[in-house]
Amino acid sequence: MVFLEMQIPWWVKLSAKLALARLPLDYAAWRQLPIFKHGFMAEPEYAFTVFKRHFEAVELPPDFVSLELGPGDSLFSALVSYSLGGSSSYLVDTGAYAIQEVEPYRIMAQFLRDQDLTVPDWEEDINLKTILATTAAQYLTDGIHSLRKIPSESINFIWSNAVLEHIRRQDFADFFQELRRVIKPNGVCSHEVDLRDHLGGGLNNLRFSSNWWEQDWVANSGFYTNRIRYSKMLQVFAHSGFRVVDHKILSTWDQQPIVREKMAPEFRDFSDEDLKVSVFSVVLEPI
């Protein structure tokens, strides 16, 4: 399915998303189309593996409190956090995208039991609210406004996977100021960031000026990334009061996937090395 999606020319995907996003359908309907799907966090093994990768990149105290940014199609990480000793968790997104049906969460719970981990044993008559309550989790769906509802210095562990690149450019610095506010003085963050466009895995998003790209009707069409490059993201982290403890470039292009002359002028001054970074991970601590 993903392979077929990648074969669609970037300009066709952009045009299709711009057109389809104007239709009066909710995300539950769009989720059936690969070009609108919010990742693979509704798959138990994938969700578990992603959480464990970030969890094992840091050191946490017992009964840690976690904050996931952008849970996407499921709230499975609430169960994973609970099963690994978390006392409570927050899951913050920009909308209520997570599946509401109970059966996938039962399947996830059984997957965790098969890993010799402990999860609640629910009665037959449960709903998503019950699942969240029994794992001491809160699902907040108003983006940066939700972050502002979280108490200061209350979080041990903040993590995200292919999410930071989707935060609106105009909100990015304020978003990290909020993360700095809610994290405990000895807290830690783990993020994996995908700098590829969401139009085919290249850098075709750099063709467009910010005057067009940052308009709300464009940004809400299902392909938006903030286009903040690697070096600039590291600068924002530092300016927000975080120290980079570790960072790894996980993937690069051998050659830039788009020639500099076809980029919008605002991106042409970045170095070749900066533009070739496609995926990176970073561990942050508050200063």
Image (cartoon, rainbow, N blue to C red):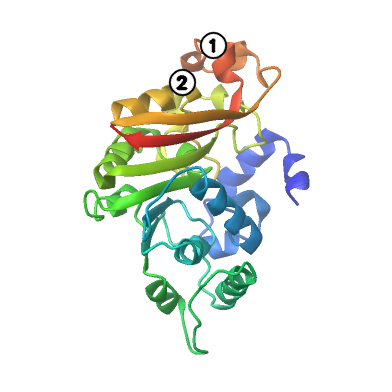
Left or right: 33 in relation to 91? right
Residue occupying image coordinates x 39% and y 47%: 158
- Tell me the kind of residue under disc 1: Ser
Instruction: Find residue 160 and report its horizontal and vertical position in percent.
Output: 47, 46
**Is residue 125 or residue 32 the one in the foreground?**
125
Q: Earlier in the sequence, mark 1 or mark 2?
A: 2
Tag 1 near tag 2, CB within 8 Å: yes
Q: Nearer the viewer, residue 210 or 203?
A: 203
Residue at left offset 38%, top offset 53%: 67
Q: Which residue appears farthest toward the bottom when viewing the image?
A: 124
Which quadrant holds residue 188? top left
Left or right position of 216 against 12: left
Q: Please, which residue is most extreme toward the left here?
A: 152
Give the residue type that dot 2 points to: Ser
> Disc 2 designates what residue?
231
Residue 26 seen: no
Q: Which residue has dot 1 on it?
A: 271
The answer to whether residue 145 is seen in the rendering is yes
- The quadrant in which the C terminus is found is top left
As drawn, 184 above or below 247:
below
Depth check: give the residue in front, 177 or 214: 177
Label 1 crowd (10 A; few <14 / some 14-19 / many >=20)? few
Image vertical order of residue 279 relative to residue 93, above or below: above
Label of residue 286 in the image = none
Q: Position of residue 268 (x, y in %)?
A: 52, 12
Q: Quadrant of residue 66?
A: bottom left
